[in-house]
Image: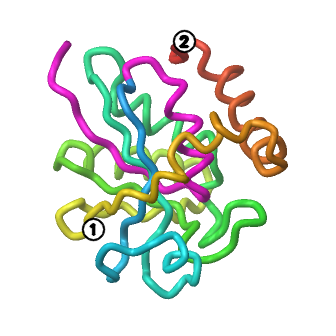
Amino acid sequence: MSQQETAIFGGGCFWCTEAVFEQLRGVTSVAPGYAGGFTVNPSYEDVCTGETGHAEVTRVMFDPDVVSYEDLLTVFFAVHDPTTLNRQGNDVGTQYRSMIITTTPQQEQEAQAMKERLSADGKKVVTEIVPLAQNPFYEAEAVHHHYFETHPDQAYCQIIINPKLEKLKQRFAELIK
């Protein structure tokens, strides 16, 4: 196995992005958390107020010899709406904004290039792209880890997450574990 890399994505509720990225081959761990704000060590309750500046994000550890960062970006942009500012479906507020926190200059270049390609297709992509050095990741409380896996019958999971997973299976079958 090659050296692990880290990717961080915010695409609305972190329960959704966690469930999606856990399905991908080459992904070795996924953790929900918070980033992009100014409050140190925020809690879920803090972030839900919309006053911390943080967004719900998902940290993805992956093996780049198995799944590329470009593949992760492609999945990220496909399973949420990067054209809605501070909103994903009924989840509204800056804590649900679309963002990519890059961990290397190469990731920043790839993320910017993909955002530009999507924008060239006539979409106004509002996804923020910011470096980790300026936006530390704070891991979410244990109750939020593997939420879909432990609450598959919960209404939010059925209505919001299941369709994202179906889309993933239909469009990216070659990337599924």
Instruction: State which quadrant residue 33 falls in.
Output: bottom left
Q: Give the residue drawn at x 17%, y 64%.
A: 133
Q: Is residue 22 magenta?
A: yes
Q: Estimate the x, y position of residue 85 in percent, counting from the top left.
A: 61, 71
Local packing at callout 2 (Cα closer than 10 Å; few below 14, some 14-19, many 20+) is few
Quadrant the N terminus occupies: top left
Instruction: Answer whether residue 11 is magenta in the image.
Output: yes
Q: Residue at x 68, y 73 (%)?
A: 92
When asked about the image quadrant of residue 40, the answer is: bottom left
Circle on res. 174: 2
Relative height, residue 52 to residue 133 (above, below)? below
168 or 39: which is nearer to us?
39
Depth check, mark 1 against mark 2: the one in front is 1
Left or right: residue 91 versus residue 110 is: right
Left/right placement of residue 91 relative to residue 109 reads right
Q: Earlier in the sequence, mark 1 or mark 2?
A: 1
- Colouring chosen for the image of the structure: rainbow
x 58%, y 76%: residue: 48
**40 above or below 130?**
below
Q: Which residue is mark 1?
A: 135
The amino acid at mark 1 is: Asn
Residue 58 picture location, percent across and down = 44, 49
Q: Which residues are magenta?
A: 1-26
**Circle 1: is it few (<14), some (14-19), or many (20+) Cα within 10 Å?**
some
> Closer to the camera, 31 or 114?
31
Cβ atoms at labels 1 and 2 below 8 Å apart: no
The type of residue carrying mark 2 is Glu
